[in-house]
Image (cartoon, rainbow, N blue to C red):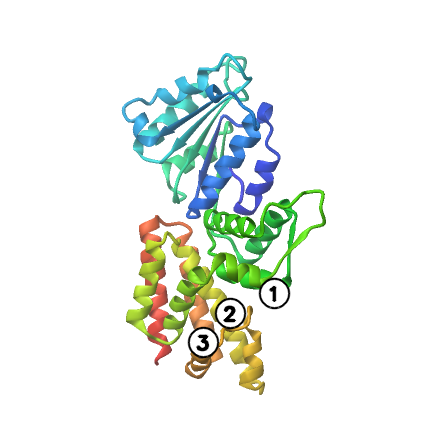
């Protein structure tokens, strides 16, 4: 069985140990999201204070030549605790073989002896194509569930920021939300780490006290400008047609662990705003006023670069750039990590070449 990406959070929130599937596959290009989802499933299934013997972690290498090990571990219930969780990291051929063997064993078992409900297997994998044997196995078996994790959209990032800060008894100003949303990547793991840094900077707050407030100054002080600076350099070099600089900026982001889809999403948001500002200018709005479209407000060092972009681009050219970015984002969601990085680079460099035409 499977759910859509936007339904994953609700599915995990509603998970009950006595009605859990025998196997859950969590996969996608958002590596941080995959890991956070797997952790949330473990917490929902085992609870907070579980016996260590209820949890077993295996990497893909442990299953090599031992297809039956997965089922054996799931069947070996601990003396204390009502359920067992086996957590597998990886999606190589050995994992595929073990999963197929495990699900076939469940299918052959009688209803009374099926371990479903008393044990569960989590498979944590990178992005998988629809034709992947692992995806097919999880999506077509009634005892299994496939959960996709894709890069977050802007509205999802804002919601995650708000929920995370509210859990720490903090609220966030609108300007600070704009600034923080623009700084963060689209990988849930990166977002979580950055928000932890922000909360650590603000300090632990008593849940019974009045909510604290996170300001734009707090965001600047806690997170600095490295994350957004790397994205800004990539976006501006692409929009100004600086091919070599754009290529180096993309390589720096990739080396820092930024997913290709994340770079494309940030570029898309910039070109959407650029398209809107150009449309206003073509309708008679002064450039100074059109620049107010950008949120958060442009830093004084970056403002001349964006003004130059407004002279290089037209709304029509921007629309074509957005078509390229949307197509590339869609392609990245179904490809392997290395292939996605190549597709993202190709799309961004195509747009950089178009900037000087």
| Label disc, if present, on residue 260 of the rendered structure | none
**Residue indicated by mark 2:** 272
At label 2, counting other C-alpha atoms closer than 10 Å, the crowd grade (few under 14, some 14-19, many 20 or more) is: some
Secondary structure type for disc 3: loop
**Residue indicated by mark 3:** 301
**Residue indicated by mark 1:** 175
Contact, CB < 8 Å: mark 2 with mark 1?
no
Q: Position of residue 3 (x, y in %)?
A: 54, 40
> Eyeballing the image, is 17 above or below 127?
above
Q: Position of residue 168 (x, y in %)?
A: 62, 46
Q: Earlier in the sequence, mark 2 or mark 1?
A: 1
Q: Would you say residue 140 is visible in this rendering?
A: yes
Q: Earlier in the sequence, mark 1 or mark 3?
A: 1
At label 3, counting other C-alpha atoms closer than 10 Å, the crowd grade (few under 14, some 14-19, many 20 or more) is: few
Q: Nearer the viewer, residue 99 or 301?
A: 301
* Residue drawn at 47 percent across, 65 percent down: 268
* Residue drawn at 55 percent across, 54 percent down: 157
């Amino acid at each position: 069985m499977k759910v859509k990406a936007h339904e994953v959070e609700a599915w995990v929130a509603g998970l009950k140990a006595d009605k859990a599937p025998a196997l859950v596959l969590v996969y996608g290009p958002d590596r941080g999201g995959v890991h956070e989802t797997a952790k949330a499933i473990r917490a929902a299934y085992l609870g907070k204070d579980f016996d260590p013997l209820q949890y077993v972690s295996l990497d893909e290498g442990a299953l090599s030549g031992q297809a039956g090990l997965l089922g054996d571990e799931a069947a070996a219930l601990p003396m204390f605790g009502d359920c067992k969780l086996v957590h597998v990291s990886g999606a190589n051929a050995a994992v595929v073989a073990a999963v197929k063997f495990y699900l076939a064993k469940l299918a052959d078992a009688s209803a009374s002896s099926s371990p479903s409900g008393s044990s569960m297997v989590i498979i944590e994998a990178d992005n998988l194509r629809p034709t992947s044997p692992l995806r097919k196995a999880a999506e077509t078996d009634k005892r299994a569930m496939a959960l996709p994790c894709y890069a977050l959209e802007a509205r999802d990032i804002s919601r995650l920021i708000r929920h995370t800060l509210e859990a720490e008894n903090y609220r966030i100003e609108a300007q600070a939300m704009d600034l923080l949303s623009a700084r963060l990547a689209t990988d849930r793991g990166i977002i979580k780490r950055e928000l932890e840094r922000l909360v650590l900077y603000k300090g632990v707050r008593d849940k019974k006290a009045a909510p604290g407030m996170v300001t734009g100054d707090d965001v600047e002080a806690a997170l600095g400008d490295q994350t957004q600076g790397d994205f800004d350099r990539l976006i501006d070099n692409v929009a100004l047609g600086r091919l070599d600089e754009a290529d180096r900026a993309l390589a720096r982001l990739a080396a820092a662990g930024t997913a290709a889809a994340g770079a494309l999403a940030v570029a898309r948001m910039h070109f959407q705003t650029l398209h809107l500002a150009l449309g206003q200018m073509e309708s008679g709005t002064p450039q100074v006023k059109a620049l107010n479209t950008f949120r958060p407000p442009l830093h004084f060092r970056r403002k001349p670069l964006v003004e130059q972009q407004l002279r290089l681009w037209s709304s029509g050219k921007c629309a074509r750039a957005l078509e390229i970015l949307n197509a590339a984002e869609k392609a990245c969601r179904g490809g392997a990590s290395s292939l996605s990085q190549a597709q993202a680079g190709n799309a961004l460099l195509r747009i950089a070449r178009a900037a000087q035409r």
